[in-house]
Every structure is written in C-alpha cells, then in structure tokens.
Image: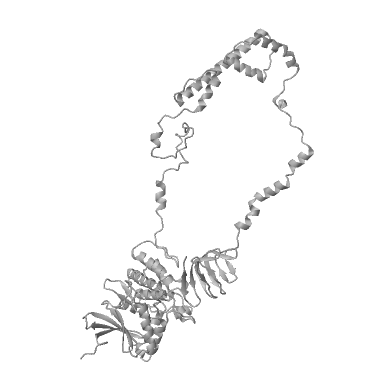
Amino acid sequence: MEELFYNRYRKEKLIGRGAFSEVWMVTDTLTGVTQALKIYSPSSKMEDDGIEMMVHEFALMANVNHQNLLHPLSFDICDSRPFLVLPFCKNGNINRKIGKFTEKEAWELLRDTANALAYLHAMEPPVIHQDIKPANILISDDGSYMLTDFGVSTKAKSTMSRLSAEDKSLLSAGTLSYMAPEKFSSNNLPIMANDIFSLGSTVYEMLTGYLPFGNEGGLLQKMGADIPELQGDYSSELKEVLKECLAKEPWERPSAKDLAKFATNMVEGKPVDFKTQDITPEPQPVEQPVQQPEAKPAPQQPEPQAIPQIEPQPGQQPQPIQPEPRPIQQPEPQPVPQLEEEQPIMTGYPSAPLSSGGSGKKIALIAAIAILLIGAGAGLWWFFSKDKAEKPTMEMTDTQEDTSIEDATGTVDLIPEAQEASEANQEALEAEPLITEEEAKPTPPAKTTEEKVTETKPKKEDTKKAESVKPDKQEQPVEQPKPKGGNLSYGSWSGKVAGGKPDGIGMLTFTSAHSFKCGNGKTITPQAGDKLTNAEFENGILYQATWNKSNGATETILP
C-alpha cells in the first residue's frame, strides 16, 4: 500500500527545498485536489517548545488576507513536524525566468511584491518576511505575483535550521545572497528595510541574470562595494528605484507603501517623480497655467470708455463689473452730473434743463463765448469813457475788478457818486504807490530764542519715538533667528532651531538619549545613535518622522 503523509496526502513531486523545509506537489486523497505541502524540519523531529512556537506564530497569521500573499489552507503537525497545506500554483516561482524579465515585468513584480510587503509591514506587530528571493515569489494563474513563506520569525527559523543542520543538502547559500548589509552588523535584528533591499536584489537579478553583490550579498557592500548601475536599455526611473532599494543605509530606502505606489503608476503609464522617502505619484497640476487665461479681467481694470460719464446714484453701492451684462447696461439713461449746475453762476442767467451730457457741454461753450463778448464790450466802454473824462489812467484795485464783473453781468453805467470818488482819490493814488500782494500779507510774529531752539532741536520724547519706528534696529533680532541647523545638547539637527528647540523639517542624529512629545499625544525617547529622518517639528513637538533606531529597527511617527 502506498505511504501517505498524514494518512491523506500522496507526494507527487519535490518542487522546492530550503534550509529548514521542503515543498512537495501532493494529491489530497480525500478531495482529489492537487495542492502544495510545505513540511518544516523534514529530516528531524521538532522539540515541543519549537512546535509550540510554530503553533503560536501561525495562529497570528490566520487572518492574513491579501491578493499578493499565498495564504495557507491549513496548518497541522505530523510526527513532530509542522506542515502547511497551500494552493498549488502550476506556473511555479520566478526562478525559471531569471535574466529574462522585461522592464514591464520588473515594474509589475515591484508593484505586486511591494503591495504584499506593505500589508505585512502595516500589521500590529509588523511582520518582516526576511527571505525575499525568486524561489519565494510565485506566479498565479492570472499572471500576477504572490509572495509565500512569510510569518515565521527569526527565532523559529534559527531553531529549525539548527535542527536540520546535520543534513548539509538542506542548507542553501541563496538567502545570504539577498541579505541587506545591516544583517552583517552586531545589531542584526529584522527591520522593514531588510525586505526592501532583498526585493531590489531580486528585481536586479531578474533583469540581468546575476545578483548585484554576488553570493556575498550585502556583506560585500558593507565592506565598501559600490552599488552597481543597472546596465541596458532601461528607463532612468527603473535605474533610480533599484539604486534607492539597494542603498547601504536602511533609512535611505523607500518604504514598501511608497514603492508600491510608484510602481503602480509606472505600470499604468502615469508621469511620476521618484524621490527617496518622498514619492508623489499624483501628477502635478501642470494644467493650471493653461486655464488661467480663460479668466475674465479683474474688476479693478474696467474698460476706459464706460466709467468717465457714469456716476452711481447717492446711497447706491458700486456693483462689481461683470463682463456679460456690461454691454446691455451701458446704453441705459444715466443721471446728469451735478457739475453742470455751476454754469448759471458764470453766465448770469438761469440755466435751462439739460437733457444729456452732450447738450450740457454745448451750453457751457455758448456761455463761455457770451462772457468773452460781454467782457470785450466792457473793455471798449471803459476805454471810451476814459477818453471823454480826460482822466489819467488809473490802475484798478481788486475791489474795482469785482465791480467790473458785476457790470458785465447787468449794469453798464457807473453812478455819478462813484465817478466823483474816483476823481477825488486820484491824486492820493498817484502820490502813494499801491500795496503789493507780498506787502499786504500779514507778517508773522518774530520767534523768540526759546522757540528757535525748540524748532532746531526736537524733544527727547520725539527722538525716542522716531528711533522706535526704525525697523532696522528693533526688528533685526526677530528677522534673524538662530542659525539654521547645528549641534543641540543631545544631537545634531539639520533644520531650523527656535528657542533652543528643533523647528521645521530636517534630520536629527542623537548623541545621547532625549525625550520628545509627539503631536499624537505619545512620548518617544530616542537613544544615542538613533536618527529621525524627514522629521517635522513645531516648537520642539514632533509631528512626523521616520525613527531609525540604532538596533536597526524602524518606526514611523505620524500625527
């Protein structure tokens, strides 16, 4: 009788083997369905504490559900060996396509895998995959990519690797080739940035056929190797994104969420810009300058031909100029400007009603001509009357000029009393010259010595007021705050400093422990060696940052 695993699954084909597990294509004899069976510690029985740890970890993963994650159908234990039953992907993993990927396939791989990682990294607590490589990325029936072999902690993998170490055939150098450089440091706890480095190495290998740092992985980079540039006819965006994923420092790599957004836009053909820690996939509002010329002229720039002859009614509020109704409102009759009422004073006759602005101007012109004619007649009369009286020429005073104006409006003969008064005063006027306008002006009283001193020397109070108005002396300390950046008592800050506290956006590297209040109500205490990148402070309160801890872990601070 054929031996069945767990008295149910018949092994058909070995499709994968790792350091602490085997993957088989099996037939479920109960249902007849082809499935995948992953057996942990296949060559050795696992101890009870290890089994208990595995049970706990897979219980935490029971509710994981994402289209780019291969979710287990069931978990069980057979002869002290934990195992998973998984959906069988007939297309297998992407190992067989190493070196054959097109740029479009690379963007699709980045999109699907980064989406899966963003889902795992957002869990509480975050789930770090720790083993991103081609063998753990499957191709689904619809052609999308699915991430498998997740949810097992480093401690559990270490335990299983130790138990299976006697069988050298189970050990693989493949995982080492995709490890990030920080994994080779004294503080090698798993962080999210580890997965981003491994994903960048995987995509690089799928395009070129070889790993960026060979079989040594990030260890070679930690020893000083530069990031190799992606060679070939690839876009600058793809070259840049792989360079950022393979950055030596963990905080210089993009998050899985930002990477997924960027790759999604590239797959969909949207114009985007890629920047480390600042990906803005939405298109910029480049259409605004094109739309602006469609706006109508502003109200403060009215058409010149409409305003001079139209005034609003008393008490009526000025209306905003609207381009559409303007041509309709202009021809309507408007009230006559009140300035035309001054014309009767100039002519001496009552003014006739004016029906329009044009007739008012004609009347004003006629009145002006009448004044000139009357003035000319008055001058002739004065000339001939002077000859008849045979009087010497007399210069008229201001009062007599006013009288001549009144004569021009109605009276044409001087009264005899006025003529006799003029003749009687003739000799006095000739003997004593007229007073000029300058002499007629009142002479101001002479200023005393005290007033002169007061005029030349301002009061002290006025001087102080004048000095207080000068902005150069009083406002310079406000306009020139403390220099941007510098060393704080607990670290080095690259942004603005206000009141001895970080203020604005920058990076803060700690030389000693220091506590900060956060905008979300929490308090964090970074230690020496920690960094806050893309940190946003307001008067010493932290509202947003990426907290890169000295132990390699990363935490996002949000408002």
Image coordinates for residue 209, horizontal then vertical, percent = 35, 77
Residue farthest to the right? 449
Image coordinates for residue 494, horizontal then vertical, percent = 55, 67
Let me know if residue 172 appears in the view: no
Q: Residue at x 77, y 41 (%)?
A: 453
Image coordinates for residue 2, horizontal then vertical, percent = 21, 90
Image coordinates for residue 96, horizontal then vertical, percent = 30, 78
In the picture, residue 457 is in which quadrant? Answer: top right
Say which of 506 and 39 sits in front. Answer: 39
Say which of 421 and 319 sits in front. Answer: 319
Quadrant that contains the N terminus: bottom left
Q: Indicate how the structure is coloured in the image.
A: one colour
Say which of 153 and 277 sits in front. Answer: 153
Q: Is residue 83 left or right of residue 183?
A: left
Q: Is residue 2 above or below residue 218?
A: below
Q: Residue at x 60, y 71 (%)?
A: 489
Q: Is residue 392 left or right of residue 52?
A: right
In the picture, residue 436 is in which quadrant? Answer: top right
Q: Is residue 239 above or below residue 407?
A: below
Q: Is residue 432 above or below residue 231?
A: above
Q: Residue at x 69, y 15 (%)?
A: 394
